[in-house]
Image: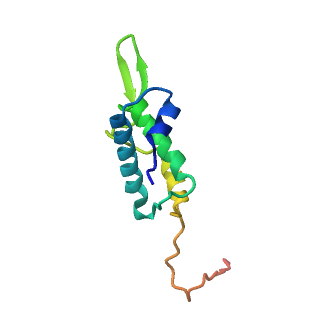
Amino acid sequence: MPLVTADDLRTLTGRPLTDAQCTLAATLTEDAIRGEVGDRLTDPPQPGVSSVALAVAARILTNPGGVRSEQAGGMLVSYADAQTGVVLSEDERRRLRRAVGLASGAGMLDISPADSCAQTILRTVW
């Protein structure tokens, strides 16, 4: 089952899109998502994955250059990221990782031996 369909993209963007545009957006989206969560993606996709996929694919079609802002006077253009290509936002990564059961944040790792215990030493200063 594809993560994104041409009909969904046309409905969401509200504009006519060629089949080639939809196929490219869907392919790039799936590649970016699989790059983030790997083989944990199921068919059909887990709840939450499709909404992220559709948002990413629509962004590819409506803002392929990743422009964050433009200014007409002086031609100033700023981009969302210095990287080129499809980039998932931190929120999209977090949502995808949660949907497929991966940890999405920093964790705590205790590397002390199991038999150790904290000792409190009290000293009296005379």
* Residue 104 seen anywhere in this rendered image of the structure: no
Q: Residue at x 48, y 38 (%)?
A: 7
Asked where in the image residue 77 lies, by quadrant, the reply is top left
Q: Residue at x 51, y 80 (%)?
A: 112
- Residue 46: x percent and y percent? 54, 58
Q: Quadrant of the N terminus?
A: bottom left
Q: Is residue 61 left or right of residue 107?
A: left
In the image shown, does 103 or 31 lie closer to the viewer?
31
- Residue 44: x percent and y percent? 50, 58
Q: Residue at x 68, y 79 (%)?
A: 124
- Compared to residue 18, the image places residue 45 above or below, namely below
- Compared to residue 54, the image places residue 38 above or below, namely below
- Residue 18: x percent and y percent? 36, 31
- Residue 64: x percent and y percent? 37, 32
Exactly how many numbered labels are in the figure? 0
Asked where in the image residue 70 lies, by quadrant, the reply is top left
* Residue 101 seen anywhere in this rendered image of the structure: yes
Q: Residue at x 35, y 15 (%)?
A: 75
